[in-house]
Image: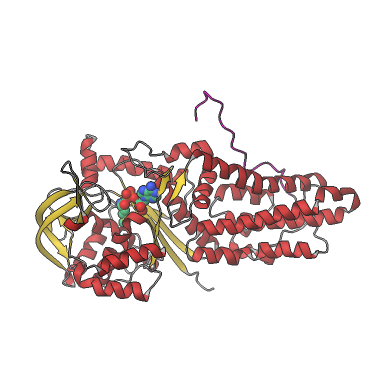
């Protein structure tokens, strides 16, 4: 038997300096949908998410909460795990940078970079943003009238002066530029690639990779008064997940990652520092880094200080898990920023889900229940119109795969909803409800074709709405082992005569709660 090709996908690991917000939920859902798509398409998938628990930011927040850092991150990591479950995600591992296997793995990465002559001890004097956990050159900062200085991403920086180990990043400049040249889709979408290429062309400085003024981090091998810079620690989670450095580990074959899914604010860390560390350690590079956009609340960046952080748990309670997953992935072009608003999500739920897909399923399945003894109807001779309808559904997989090449989740859904729209036109034009007396065999064929299109749509939408699609496939009598992409097209056509469960609605309309009942 041929072995399935592997696919290793990661999300960013989330900082544990506060509870999860909607941006974290968005990244998890998008990544989970890609992982599910690949599994259904026959890949041996390893998908990982997790938490980034060390560093000065987390240590400070823990202290502000009167807790020791480990007790604090345990609480927050638990909340992230709960969110992962609440959102119906299917990650294979939830990694924490405080997990026992992460220390030896990261120290080994350090040793290899050191053995390659890329680490030296010196003194750091410069600007540091605790919020971004990032060093900024003076020219990247701006001084405000009130004396505060802000770093590249608009967060306050402070002056840091201490002994530090440095990584010879400068000497990787040409190799990085050759990488971007040789592997054009290493960084996507293309706008992010252009930003990074010009950043690297403008000249790199060596990177400070250890700190001595706090201790919440991984100790530097051989010099434990230094803790590793939190980004060395954090990025290496991707290797730890594959059992690094043990080549005999059963997960070892997953490295290199096929894609790191991350947000646009941390592309530099993933496409400059990370490949340079790996080149230095003599390890293969991830194949792709995809920088998605930000989810904005009515056009504004979410932040605690703006008071507009939306709690993902409250959102799933209000709208439903699959509804929220669909909204995130359909409304926002993956790669660009997108807006969240109550009106927009309700619009999607009622138009795309309740009307377009839900009504079609409900109407056709109720007719089958009523007129065909609750069994998949027989399919008679096909007209040109039937053939065209089935052909469109049969061609959906190829289009879906094409969209997924660029992780264009919004295009994937747009393609599938074009099939749904065509199925609605087909159903309306063929008026099966008028054929009961005049031509029941023709009516059955129209119902069969409609149900068969729904089967294929449901299989293909599973990555985005796993629960709702499972229900729809149950209603269509599709066996649980016939729901992968291998069952798409003619190979898996519905079998006439199979008895079906009583239909019930899958996508209820969103009805505004009565005033006074709360949101
Ligand atoms: O950056 N919309 O962690 P983090 C969409 N620990 N995505 C958003 C977002 C928003 N409003 N806000 C944040 C870190 N994100 C590091 C990563 S990886 C080795 C270490 C995304 O908790 C953000 O871009 O600040 C990032 O990909 C992820 O959420 C975690 O952000």
In x, y percent, where is residue 435? 86, 51
Q: In this view, does 48 lie above or below 367?
A: below
Q: Residue at x 63, y 57 (%)?
A: 418
In x, y percent, where is residue 404? 51, 63
Q: Which colour scheme is used?
A: secondary structure
Does the rendering let one see residue 24? no
Relative depth, front residue between 151 and 411: 151
In x, y percent, where is residue 18? 31, 41
Q: Which residue is drawn at 20% across and 55% down?
A: 135
**Residue 130 relative to residue 13: left or right:** left
Picture quadrant of residue 258: bottom left
Magenta stretch bounds: 500-519
Residue 502: say if magenta. Answer: yes
Picture quadrant of residue 21: top left
Q: Which residue is drawn at 26% across and 70% down?
A: 201
The quarter of the image holding the N terminus is: bottom right
């Amino acid at each position: 038997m041929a072995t399935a090709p592997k696919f290793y996908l990661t999300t960013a690991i989330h900082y544990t300096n506060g509870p999860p917000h909607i941006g974290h939920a968005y990244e998890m859902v998008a990544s989970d949908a890609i992982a599910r798509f690949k599994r259904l398409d026959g890949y041996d998938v390893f998908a990982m998410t997790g938490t980034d628990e060390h560093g000065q930011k987390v240590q400070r927040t823990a202290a502000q909460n009167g807790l020791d850092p480990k007790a604090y991150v345990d609480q927050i990591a638990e909340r992230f795990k709960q969110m992962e479950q609440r959102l119906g995600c299917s990650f294979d591992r939830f990694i924490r940078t405080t997990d026992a296997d992460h220390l030896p793995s990261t120290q080994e990465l350090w040793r290899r970079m050191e053995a390659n002559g890329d680490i030296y001890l010196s003194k750091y004097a410069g600007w540091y943003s605790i919020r971004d956990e990032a060093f900024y050159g003076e020219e990247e900062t701006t001084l405000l009238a009130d004396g505060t200085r802000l770093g590249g991403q608009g967060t306050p920086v402070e002056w840091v002066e201490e002994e530090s180990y440095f990584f010879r990043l400068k000497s990787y400049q040409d190799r990085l530029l050759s990488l971007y040249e040789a592997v054009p889709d290493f960084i996507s979408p293309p706008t992010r690639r252009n930003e990074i290429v010009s950043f690297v062309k403008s000249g790199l400085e060596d990177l400070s990779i250890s700190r001595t003024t706090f201790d919440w981090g991984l100790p530097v091998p051989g010099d434990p008064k230094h803790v590793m810079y939190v980004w060395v620690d954090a990025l290496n989670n991707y290797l730890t997940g594959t059992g690094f450095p043990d080549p005999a580990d059963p997960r070892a074959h997953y490295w290199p990652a096929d894609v790191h899914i991350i947000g646009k604010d941390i592309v530099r860390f993933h496409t400059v520092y990370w490949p340079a560390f790996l080149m230095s350690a003599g390890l293969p590079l991830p194949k792709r880094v995809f920088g998605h956009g930000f989810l904005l609340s009515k056009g504004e960046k979410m932040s605690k200080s703006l008071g507009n952080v939306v709690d993902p748990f409250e959102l799933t309670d209000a709208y439903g898990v699959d509804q929220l997953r669909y909204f995130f992935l359909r409304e926002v072009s993956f790669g660009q920023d997108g807006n969240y608003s109550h009106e927009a999500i309700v619009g999607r739920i009622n138009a795309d889900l309740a009307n377009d897909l839900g009504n079609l399923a409900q109407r056709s399945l109720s007719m089958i229940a009523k007129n065909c003894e609750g069994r998949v109807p027989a399919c008679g001779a096909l007209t040109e119109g039937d053939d065209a309808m089935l052909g469109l559904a049969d061609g959906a997989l190829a289009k879906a795969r094409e969209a997924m090449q660029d992780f264009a989740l919004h295009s994937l859904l747009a393609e599938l909803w074009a099939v749904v729209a065509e199925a609605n036109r087909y159903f309306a034009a063929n008026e099966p409800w008028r054929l009961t007396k005049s031509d029941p065999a023709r009516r059955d064929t129209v119902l069969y074709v409609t149900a068969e299109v729904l089967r294929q749509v449901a299989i293909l939408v599973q990555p985005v709405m796993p629960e709702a699609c499972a229900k729809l496939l149950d209603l269509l009598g599709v066996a649980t082992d016939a729901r992968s992409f291998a069952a798409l097209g003619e190979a898996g056509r519905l079998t006439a005569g199979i008895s079906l469960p009583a239909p019930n609605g899958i996508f209820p309309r969103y009805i505004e709660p009565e005033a006074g009942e709360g949101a």
